[in-house]
Image: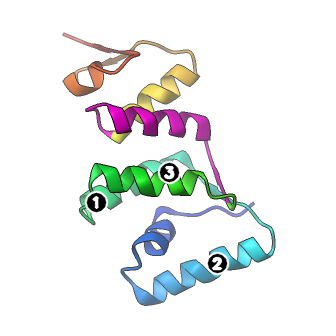
Amino acid sequence: MPALDTNVLVRYIVQDDTAQAAAARRLIRQCVNEQLVLFVPVTVTLELEWVLRASFGCGKGEVVRVLSELFSAAELSFESEQALEVALELYRSEQADFADCLHLALAAQAGAQPLWTFDKAAAKVGGARLLT
């Protein structure tokens, strides 16, 4: 199973570089035609959220929409997909950032709670505790 790096997904989504966007589309189309599923590491998903927000100015709603669409794409297989979906729901409804929501979801999946944090927004999410 081939895997994708963050920059390939960014080019595919944002289309900010014509040549790289076309290459990303060709690769994904080729894999779909060959019935290959593309693996997306959890670290790529985390970096993708950050790049969309920090480099391209996407708001929370847009990030949630993009990630939701990617998670439902049959040609993509996400590492820790269940935790990513939990993290996305937490991010949608809480004030914590996506990274903290993912940390919480992965910790919960591992049965490791609470997640101790100095982050006041993250500490408000179920499963986290503020360290004082």
- Element at badge 1? loop
Is residue 108 one of those drawn in magenta?
A: no
> Disc 1 vs disc 3: Cβ atoms closer than 8 Å?
no
Q: Position of residue 107 (x, y in %)?
A: 49, 23
Q: Nearer the viewer, residue 73 or 21?
A: 73
Report the disc number at residue 58. 1
* Within-10-Å neighbours for mark 1: few <14, some 14–19, many 20+: some
Is residue 81 one of those drawn in magenta?
A: yes
Q: Is residue 70 left or right of residue 131?
A: right
Q: Position of residue 116 (x, y in %)?
A: 33, 16
- Element at badge 3? helix
Q: Is residue 74 left or right of residue 113?
A: right
User: Residue at coordinates 28% horizontally, 60% vertically from top-left?
Assistant: 58
Q: Nearer the viewer, mark 2 or mark 1?
A: 1
Q: Magenta part of the protein: which range?
A: 76-97
* Within-10-Å neighbours for mark 3: few <14, some 14–19, many 20+: some
**Residue wearing tag 2:** 27
Report the disc number at residue 68. 3
User: Residue at coordinates 81% horizontally, 74% vertically from top-left?
Assistant: 34
- Element at badge 2? helix
Q: CA distance from mark 1 to mark 3?
A: 14 Å
Q: CA distance from mark 2 to mark 1?
A: 25 Å
Tell me where residue 55 sits by quadrant: bottom left
Q: Is residue 31 left or right of residue 57?
A: right
User: Residue at coordinates 24% horizontally, 12% vertically from top-left?
Assistant: 131
Q: Quadrant of the N terminus?
A: bottom right
Q: CA distance from mark 3 to mark 2?
A: 21 Å
As displayed, is residue 92 above or below residue 75? above
* Residue 6 visible: yes
As displayed, is residue 7 above or below residue 114? below
